[in-house]
Amino acid sequence: MTTSPTTPTPALRADPPHKGEGKTRLERLLRPKSVAVIGGGAFATNVVKQSLKMGFPGNIWPVHPKRGEVEGLQAYCSVADLPDSPDAVFIGVNRFATIEVVRELAARKAGGAICFAAGFREAGADDEDGERLQQELIAAAGSMPVIGPNCYGLINYADGALLWPDQHGGQRLESGTRGAAIITQSSNIACNLTMQQRGLPISFLMTAGNQAQTGLSEMALGLIEDERVSCLGLHIEGFDKVDGFERLAARARELKKPIVAVKVGRSEQARAATVSHTASLAGSDAASEAFLKRLGIARVHSIPSLLETLKLLHAVGPLAGYTLSSMSCSGGEASVMADTAEGRKARFPALAEAHRARVKATLGPLVAVANPLDYHTFIWNNEPAMTATFTAMVSGGFDLNMLVLDFPRNDRCSDADWWATVNAFDAALKANKARGAIVASMLENLPEGHAIEFFRRGIVPLHGIVEAFDAAEAAAFIGEAWSRPSTSPLWGGRAECAGGGKAGDATPTPALRADSPHKGEGKVVPDEAEAKALLRSAGLAVPQGLRAANVAEAVSAAEKLGFPAALKALGVAHKSELGAVKLNLRSAGEVQAAAGALLPLGSGLYVERMVEGAVAELIVGVTRDEMFGPVMTVGTGGVLVELLKDSATLLLPASHADIEAALQGLRLYPLLDGYRGRPKADVPAAVEAILGISRFVLEHAGSIEELDVNPLIVCGEGKGAWIADALLVTSEALTSPSMGEVATKSREGVSA
């Protein structure tokens, strides 16, 4: 982790750079004028060493009952003996002693404390003291901010204040410059981040630990208020507060400080490790993905991609779109770039004819001009020629221009000839007022010193081709999100974690599946007839249907509703697998035979008017997440829903535009849109049906545990979208209309 006094930085205001637009209760802790260090072990001593080494200009007060000095500084016997109330305190004593120290600091009105000790709630059920000590810690702190426990603490590279008990690889941020701020829930990952050699300037690095009292979102809010913070990176194991993250995202948008996150917990193994390590509960990954997307926080899936995205956001901010250009002197590199873009939103648009002609005019007849561009070695080390080619290529108005350039190792080779290429690219970007990145295919082929020099020139140094694409897509996602109006707050998000509440649900939300009721203790599972009556009473499009107790009633119902008919056994899970559904019955005889076969399988029969003219089948499922409230899944439906796994996740409330975008993102969507001349589906009706389902869920959100509409049959244009099957699981019985002839509130004209 390095920085440079010449790193380009947006103009700062005239007031001191550490004074942000707003103060938070973490102000003294994050930007201290005085630091107290409590404890006599090696970790506490290291805190003193690191702050001295970094040149912290404020007071450093070691506290130890038996030592007169620590690292040449006067030591104090107790908190009560300190000359003043400290702004920030590192507590390096055992978990039992930590409680009393926190109580004493709160009494002295300290600005805040880092609790290093482990063995609180994160110790798990096997440690009977852990939960009790966590509650005692919270009570002892009162209103004084406490970070942790079980965390390394804070590195403030902007002021040189290190409440950090270990070595680190960073250096002081130069005066007048800015850098990225990073928060992680893992102290070891934080240590590793300080050792990066990618040229990223870092202003603050912070660990969240257990989040007993102060959650990650509050820490992040405190950091982004600092003028010396350009962007924010988060490594998240579990969210602390839904409303806290909503406030963070809104404030980041106001301050134009983009956020990128690595959210772990996609695998069962990651969820298990999260619980044992931090006591933060990860929750459903699909819901987490939807939450971050809703907030305009970009998500990447690796630490290298996090760092590369932070570099791009630090240097140029969010991108306006996903269009890229690429230049290299190798056809192999051009092919790798093109292949890496395959299947991504970031893309290399073909050159317009006039643009292509401009580029062609700068190159010889043997060069095929395209995007990505292989400009060949004919002009290598010819700075004027390369400047002309690069200037012509960059003139296309791309959102980001990439130059693929790996440098030779400088211990055995010379890279002198490479700088003509850098100079030409620099001149081309400036001539076009364009954004550009130099991309090395391998980390070791772009030294840290070179990366710092590129930052100084306003060029983003990116390490790794895949990581460069991840960064470009993340930056474009943020630009896209910020171009839209802010989203409304979530309906059902829970806002308790800090202070001892949960941070989500560590149990992954099960994949929704057709007719598989969740029959847990205290759960109410109405049969399909009852569930559909409830949906129909809410004004949703449900085909006409009647309940039947025997074969004769089934035949009578079918004749009344009209043919073709669908017949189902009620009270049966996995109806398709058990053959408990008979479709396209076109006569009384067919209904009679089917009813005789189905009646022994369940608690009765349900007869429906068959939906005809289907173009596609969707699943619309809702579960209740402990963190986010109602979570809606929209995807390809039918019996292959789990196999296809073509779905999108939305948090409620969702807008018309949200649902449209979710449908358009499905692999199924071309079929809805009239694939290869086939009939187009009634997509507006599908959107309205999904909106109606979401409204029904929100009206009963306190009771609904699951709602699984599979399939929602989408017919041809103007023919509607119909709820053909529904599974409902509630925590209490919902008011329903008469279960007799429920067709009275159904819509007419089911048949296409």
Image (cartoon, grey):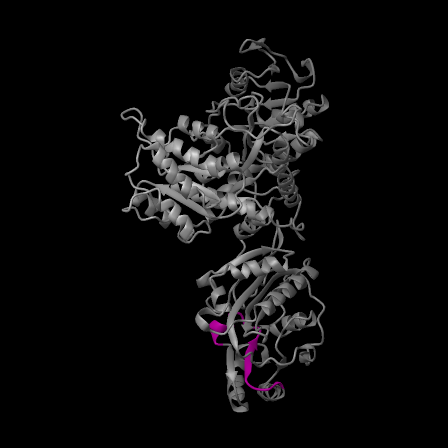
Q: Residue 574: within the magenta? A: yes
Position of residue 371 relative to residue 420, above or below, is below
Residue at 69% in and 65% down: 733
Question: How many labels sit on residues?
Answer: 0
Position of residue 579 relative to residue 130, above or below, is below
Position of residue 22 relative to residue 733, above or below, is above
Q: Which residues are magenta?
A: 561-579
Residue 405 visible in image: no
The C terminus, quarter of image: bottom right
Position of residue 12 relative to residue 364, above or below, is above
The answer to which quarter of the image holds residue 91 is top right
Q: Who is closer to the viewer here, 370 or 131?
A: 370
Residue 282's x, y, as percent? 55, 45
Q: Who is closer to the viewer here, 52 or 185?
A: 52
Residue 194's x, y, as percent? 47, 28
Residue at 71% in and 76% down: 738
Q: Who is closer to the viewer here, 173 or 350?
A: 350
Q: Residue 288: within the magenta? A: no
